[in-house]
Amino acid sequence: MGLVKLLKNAEVFSPKPVGKKDILIVGNKIAVVESDISVNVPDLDIINASGLIAIPGLIDTHVHFLGGGGEGGFSTRTPELDPRDCIVNGVTTLVGCLGTDGITRSLDSLYAKAKALEECGLTTFIYTGSYRVPPVTFTGSVQRDIVLIDKVIGVGEIAISDHRSSQPTYEEILRIVADARVGGMLSGKPGIVNFHVGAGRKGIEYLFKIAEETEIPIQHLYPTHMSRSKKLFEEGLRFCELGGVIDITALQPFEKEENFGPVDALVMAYENGLIDAVTISSDAQGSLPVFDDKGNMVGFKVGSVAALLHTVKLAVEKGLPLELILKTVTLTPAKVLRLKYKGKIEKGYDADIVLMEDFHIKWVISKGKFLMVEGNVVEPFKVM
């Protein structure tokens, strides 16, 4: 297919609703979003998008590219991410991380997997580090990793308030955040620290202390799994009121929301006027372990990037406005990650666009190339 593509008569959510529009794509960029675009160029690809909703490609800020798990022994390790899973679920930009296992899975392999996904047409970044403190790094320094390794945008996922963490001290956490900030300043990257927040009683106490007692801007603190409990999410909303952004883990299609979960959290954030300070990530390929009251793992399932759109759909069914929930997986994560040209369907932005009908994805365009055509995935290395 050609370099110029024209999507006709799509109902555009940019993520804000802008009505029925045509979208002209030139190369990897959105050139025009207007009504009744007419162009005459050689090899023009025209897509009839009548009856379809156009949304920005989804941004997933927390994915285990190499798989996760292992907390129950070697046989409980989970598989690597398949790029097709991203495509069929409309995810075009992802951030990869290591989790509990920073030993049998390495940053070198994480980087290689990120490059492989990029070659399949996606946009990828990674965090240096893992659960452990001091963090595993490429160069021996968090700051050097962020400055010198192109795909490294921050540190994560550093575990706090969790029995699987290194039980880090406040001073250790503060030093990591300080190094991430300066690394980000020197490289023009976000320099964020993605915190895995467990079920421990301290919650995000350390993060409040950093935000309230140091000169480090709160935008470098990015806690995830914040919908783990209502109590933790209430802490998260207080964090948002200070100017921070929190991340909640999406509900997997095979999960049932019991007691308090991500959809409840989205409703609560919306009702408190803080939905713009919340993002959703999938924790894809990570294990979803179940522990008994003695801390022994008794079972697990594997997360999927499908959870993002699934959670958006559930939130809309709860009565939340589509345009606001879409921001949690498009525009807001783009701002957190400082991706200037991601997260919107607008002139000058990257041509990352998903066309869907009633949350069923029909077309996926990433960086101006078709990754899904009429419901069929374009095989990797043959992107059109």
Image (cartoon, grey):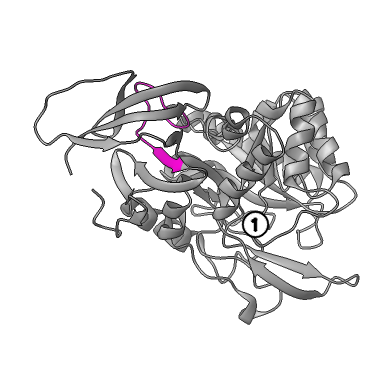
Percent across and percent down for residue 33 are: 34, 21
The quarter of the rendered structure image containing the N terminus is: top left
275 or 362: which is nearer to us? 362
Q: Secondary structure at mark 1?
A: loop
Which quarter of the picture shows residue 44? top left
Query: Measuring 76% from the left and 59% from the top, which residue is drawn there?
Result: 166
Q: Describe residue 122's horizontal placement relative to residue 217 as left or right.
A: left
Q: Describe residue 128's horizontal placement relative to residue 195 as left or right.
A: left
Is 184 situated above or below 356?
A: above
Query: Measuring 55% from the left and 54% from the top, which residue is drawn there?
Result: 306
Q: Residue furthest top?
A: 35
Residue 28 shows up from this direction: yes
Query: Measuring 68% from the left and 25% from the top, which residue is drawn there?
Result: 217
Q: Mark 1 = which residue?
A: 252
Magenta part of the protein: which range? 341-356
Percent across and percent down for residue 36 are: 28, 19
- The amino acid pointed to by label 1 is Gln
103 or 287: which is nearer to us? 287
352 in the magenta segment: yes
In terms of secondary structure, what is the magenta stretch mainly? loop
Percent across and percent down for residue 144 are: 50, 43
Q: Estimate how packed mark 1 is, as few (under 14), some (14 to 19) or many (20 or more) residues with alpha carbons within 10 Å.
A: many
Q: Describe residue 207's horizontal placement relative to residue 220 as left or right.
A: right
